[in-house]
Image: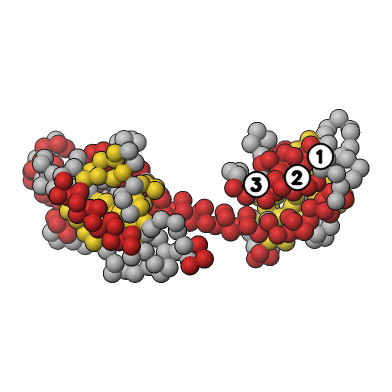
């Protein structure tokens, strides 16, 4: 193996945990080859479609690789063979990814006319088997990360708080909505990393359920394994509801060192702040009708809504009848349930703007 390649290869494997991935590897490879910059160009579509995704280290300008990514013959290069890239001052190594996609390791030479290290071909050849083993993880990690981000987005926009705790209710992870419910609900707190209920009786029940459900954590999820708890408060008739389930399923080969339970929080007293623009688009409401629908969904009565909108009660009643017709409902309760369960409920905002 050429000199210095072992150290570069070590960074290739440790770089899986970096964000962006392989930043130190690309930087070290650039230095070893006496280049200007290195990047990974990933085909964005199945087959040999136009490559669009460019992975570079922090501080490196991906725009410098855009022209290379657009070269028409990039997808025609032979697989697993280092080569100089015609039409640029760069060398590349094209490899196959699952699903018929390709990934190119590209190293650009410095613009001052000084070429890359003479052993660049030997270095890329030595790295090839390692790259073939590690690069498929890029897609797998990317897909996992994408699913996680989607799940987090859905939870945050739907107003559901989720907390993962150990057997003693010590927090392992918590989403932002759960933080807000704890802060605003007045029935829960975090004390030295432990989730606690304000009332001692609730605390005993909470800890009892957490210990039992953590003990029921298995390799496969069980839908019927849950406990519920309503945390009453002094200033609101609506309780904060708590559902406690066993922690995420685990495979026997990677059984967790400590059991966990998943706590799902909902606060029916929290305002959703539907966006009237969404209601207008979803149900073809006028702006006035959408404003009225938002107020009703937020718990206001027809009289309160009319007063806030500056219209007469008769006008508000007439608008409500039109809303019923457009949404296919005939009662105010049915209308509110429809609005809160529709995609419009995902437009909630917590201090990030004002609904129309």
Are the residues at dot 2 and dot 3 in contact (C-beta closer than 8 Å)? no
Q: Quadrant of the C terminus?
A: top left
Give the answer, above or below, for where 226 lies relative to 237. below
* Residue shown at the point (35%, 46%) measured from the top left: 171
Q: Distance between the residues labelled 1 and 2?
A: 8 Å
Give the left or right position of residue 82, taking residue 43 as reference. right
* Residue shown at the point (40%, 60%) measured from the top left: 248
Looking at the picture, how far across and down is residue 272, in whole percent? Answer: 26, 45
Give the left or right position of residue 98, taking residue 339 as reference. right
Q: Can residue 6 be seen in this view?
A: yes
Q: Provide the residue designation for mark 3.
A: 15
Looking at the picture, how far across and down is residue 56, in whole percent? Answer: 67, 42
Mark sitting on residue 94: none
Looking at the picture, how far across and down is residue 61, in whole percent? Answer: 68, 35
Are the residues at dot 1 and dot 2 in contact (C-beta closer than 8 Å)? yes
Tag 1 secondary structure: helix
Q: Provide the residue designation for mark 1.
A: 32
Are the residues at dot 1 and dot 3 in contact (C-beta closer than 8 Å)? no
Tag 3 secondary structure: helix
Looking at the picture, how far across and down is residue 251, in whole percent? Answer: 48, 66
In the rendered structure, which disc, 1 or 2, sits on the residue that comes first in sequence?
Answer: 2
Give the answer, above or below, for where 306 lies relative to 215. above
* Residue shown at the point (48%, 67%) measured from the top left: 252
In the rendered structure, which disc, 1 or 3, sits on the residue that comes first in sequence?
Answer: 3
Tag 2 secondary structure: helix
Local packing at callout 2 (Cα closer than 10 Å; few below 14, some 14-19, many 20+) is: many
Q: Provide the residue designation for mark 2.
A: 8
Q: Distance between the residues labelled 2 and 3?
A: 10 Å
Q: Quadrant of residue 271?
A: top left
* Residue shown at the point (29%, 67%) measured from the top left: 225
Give the left or right position of residue 235, taking residue 279 as reference. left
Local packing at callout 3 (Cα closer than 10 Å; few below 14, some 14-19, many 20+) is: some
């Amino acid at each position: 193996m050429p000199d210095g390649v072992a150290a570069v290869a070590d960074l290739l494997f440790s770089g899986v945990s970096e964000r962006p991935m392989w930043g130190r590897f690309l930087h070290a490879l650039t230095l070893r080859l006496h280049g200007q910059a290195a990047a990974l160009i990933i085909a964005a579509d199945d087959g040999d479609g136009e490559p669009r995704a460019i992975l570079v280290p922090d501080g490196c300008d991906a725009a410098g690789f855009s022209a290379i990514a657009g070269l028409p013959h990039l997808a025609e290069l032979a697989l697993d063979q280092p080569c100089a890239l015609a039409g640029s001052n760069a060398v590349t190594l094209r490899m196959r990814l699952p699903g018929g996609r390709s990934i190119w390791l590209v190293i650009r030479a410095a613009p001052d006319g000084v070429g890359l290290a003479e052993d660049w071909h030997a270095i890329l050849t030595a790295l090839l088997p390692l790259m073939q083993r590690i690069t498929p993880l890029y897609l797998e990690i990317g897909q996992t990360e994408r699913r996680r981000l989607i799940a987090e987005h859905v939870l945050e926009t739907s107003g559901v708080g989720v907390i993962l705790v150990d057997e003693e209710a010590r927090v392992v992870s918590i989403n932002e909505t759960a933080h807000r419910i704890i802060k605003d609900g007045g029935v829960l707190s975090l004390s030295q990393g432990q989730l606690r209920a304000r009332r001692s009786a609730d605390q005993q029940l909470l800890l009892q359920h957490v210990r039992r459900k953590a003990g029921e954590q298995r390799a496969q999820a069980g839908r019927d394994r849950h406990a519920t708890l309503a945390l009453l408060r002094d200033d609101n008739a609506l309780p904060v509801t708590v559902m406690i389930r066993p922690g995420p399923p685990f495979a026997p080969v990677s059984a967790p060192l400590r059991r966990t339970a998943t706590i799902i929080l909902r606060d029916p007293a929290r305002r959703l702040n539907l966006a009237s623009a969404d209601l207008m688009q979803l149900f073809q409401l006028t702006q006035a009708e959408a404003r009225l629908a938002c107020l009703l969904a937020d718990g206001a009565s027809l009289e309160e809504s009319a007063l806030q909108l500056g219209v007469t009660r008769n006008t508000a009643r007439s608008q409500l009848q039109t809303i019923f017709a457009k949404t296919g409902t005939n009662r105010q309760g049915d209308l509110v349930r429809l609005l809160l369960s529709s995609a419009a409920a995902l437009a909630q905002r917590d201090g990030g703007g004002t609904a129309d």
